[in-house]
Image (tube, rainbow, N blue to C red):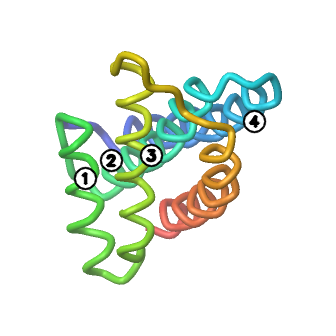
Amino acid sequence: MSLSEEERVAVVSYRIEKAQNAIDEAEKVSAIGLWNIAANRLYYALFYASTAILIKKELAAHTHAGVIAMISLHLVQQGLLSTEDIRLIRKLFSLRQEGDYEDFVEVTEEEIQRYLPMVKILLDKMIGICNTL
């Protein structure tokens, strides 16, 4: 994706806004017990933040797995994210996949209650990274 600096700034800002909206949505659907949807929104909060970082770094990936791989390659190796952070992103990707596409799989309240605070912390960290690039 070839973007001007002005376009890149606009897209990065939009993706960060989408990430923040997704975490808000995760909290709202959690409050009414929609655990599969909450898992989806938790994952997408991290996905949107990841794509914002990649755009800011002028990197591209064309799949979800590619985004995760690029974030791992470029941010873990630079010491900006930990391997635990990447594990969380991968876990949420897997949970979202299962909740969205697998038959007879239900994400549990316990899973969402475990991951929600972790995602909030990681999202803040990723937004901070994005703002300092």
Q: Mark 2 highlights which residue?
A: 55
Q: Are marks 1 and 2 in contact (CB under 8 Å)?
A: yes
Q: Name the residue under label 4.
A: 27
- Residue type, numbered disc 3: Leu
In this rendering, would 52 be left or right of 39?
left
Which residue is depicted at the point 42% across and 42% down? 47
What separation in Å lies between label 4 and label 1 (alpha carbons)? 31 Å
Q: Name the residue under label 3.
A: 92
Q: Where is residue 64 in the image (x, y as percent from the top left)?
A: 26, 38
Q: Position of residue 106 (x, y in %)?
A: 52, 27
User: Dot 3: within a 10 Å radius of its alpha carbon, few (fewer than 14), some, or many (20 or more) residues?
Assistant: many
Badge nearest the viewer, 4 or 2? 4
Q: Earlier in the sequence, mark 3 or mark 2?
A: 2
* Outermost bottom residue: 79
| Amino acid at the residue labelled 4 | Glu
Residue to which mark 1 is pinned: 58
Residue toward you, 111 or 1 = 111
Whether the residues at callouts 4 and 3 have beta carbons within 8 Å, the answer is: no
